Amino acid sequence: MTDRSDHPLAPYAARPASSGARLVDEAESPGRSPFRRDRDRIVHAQAFRRLAHKTQVFISEEGDHYRTRLTHTIEVAQIARSLARNLALDTDLTEALALAHDLGHTPFGHTGEDALAAVMQPYGGFEHNAQTLRIVTKLEQRYASFDGLNLTFETLGGIIKHNGPMLDAGGKVLDAKLGGALPFALTDFMASSGLSTGDLALADHASLEAQIAAISDDIAYNTHDVDDGVRAGFFALDDLVHVPLVASILKEIDSAHPDLGAERRMGEFTRRMITRLIVDVESHARSRLKTLGIASPQDVKRAGQPVGLFSEAVAQDVWMVKAFLFKTVYRNDEMMALRAEADRVLRDLFAHVMIHPEEMPDGWRLTAGEAASEPVLARRVCDFIAGMTDRYALSMHARLFDDTPDLRYGAAI
């Protein structure tokens, strides 16, 4: 099999011809590389469609022009594909990972993740990146021969290590938020598939394609959350001029277009910001590839440090944007009130369905024996709720309770 890329690949790029193994053997697709097949399966997944009605920052019913989890994902994929092509990487693998990166998100964004993490703490916890793995290896049930999407190990590795290696060289879990244990979804997958931490190379870095997909997520949300925050009236664009990169871009725009209207000025800022960040990552990655002497996909994974990063100066600017958004948007007083109400909705649903599992639709209900096991029941209820869209969660809550809140920003709660 050839690599079937639409452009020449760099020596350090992932190669589907040598990385196309799957847990369940399948006949080769006649017209697609293994990574392109992965991408297509992700696009056709039910979990992918549900992203259209899941919160990015503002609840999906807030307004037509705010990002949803789906539009954010598409934007990440566009940025990732551009970067991958510029760096001569496999664009199909990069795009597949970008399209998959938020499949495990709950309704109501990170608020929903926090709520499920809290109620699932006695049963193995919950984390949205791990839930993505659970979706693509177990919960999607559209194929006759296997559960999940049966993605290549290269794609699975990129999903598992979206935020970097899971273990250090001594086998210690690196992410402090995981409390020293690997996520349930990962350990459950390893147990059911017969794989080990060594088989999944959890101490290695992910491919450069996966690193580019991850940094593209940062580029997208740090730019587009500014756009949505200004649109919502949380702040004015000029409130960010303390960030050198933002000040530089606005100076360029105002010099070239001194009478530009606010909407066009915002659009011009967004596109220039994305371009600046893409150029920085590409330039810095090329420099690191040379400095680290990377000449193969294995060199990327065993470099001991990431390759796809912002330069130090731009990373500081991005951190300043994040800090500003955290204070003015994510932890805005009214947003915190909405978060509290969204948290209550999901906790109410979890508690109710744990007592009344028959409330789950066909396909979700457990056998009597399974339902008798509290941890098994809790995981099934968690999977059910995590897969909900915002509006499905609110609709079910309104059917079961008399105090369902209006979660739109600006609405009386």
Image: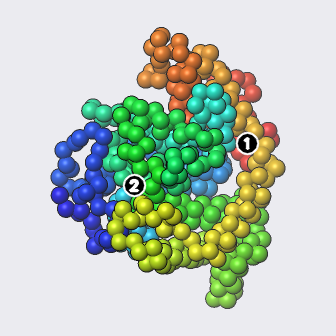
Disc 2 designates what residue?
Answer: 96
Q: Quadrant of the N terminus?
A: bottom left
Nearer-the-camera pick, 290 or 24:
290
Number of labels in the image equals 2
Q: What crowding class fits label 1: few (fewer than 14 Cα within 10 Å), some (14-19), or many (20 or more)?
A: many
| Residue 83 on image: x %, y % | 44, 70
Q: Is residue 254 above or below residue 234?
A: below
Visible in this render: residue 146?
A: yes
Which disc number belongs to residue 339? 1
Nearer-the-camera pick, 49 or 379:
379
Visible in this render: residue 64?
A: no
| Residue 103 on image: x %, y % | 49, 45
Q: Is residue 216 above or below residue 291?
A: above
Q: Secondary structure at mark 2?
A: helix
Residue occupying image coordinates x 51% and y 59%: 214
| Residue 74 on image: x %, y % | 48, 57
Residue occupying image coordinates x 76% and y 68%: 236
Q: Say whether residue 253 is left or right of residue 172.
A: right
Q: Say whether residue 58 is left or right of residue 101.
A: right
Q: Nearer the viewer, mark 1 or mark 2?
A: 2
Q: Quadrant of the C terminus?
A: top right
Q: Is residue 321 above or below residue 282?
A: above
Which disc number belongs to residue 210? none
Q: What crowding class fits label 2: few (fewer than 14 Cα within 10 Å), some (14-19), or many (20 or more)?
A: many
Disc nearer the start of the sequence (1/2) = 2
Residue occupying image coordinates x 58% and y 49%: 174
| Residue 251 on image: x %, y % | 69, 84
Q: Secondary structure at mark 1?
A: helix
Nearer-the-camera pick, 268 or 17:
17
Q: Residue furthest bottom?
A: 255
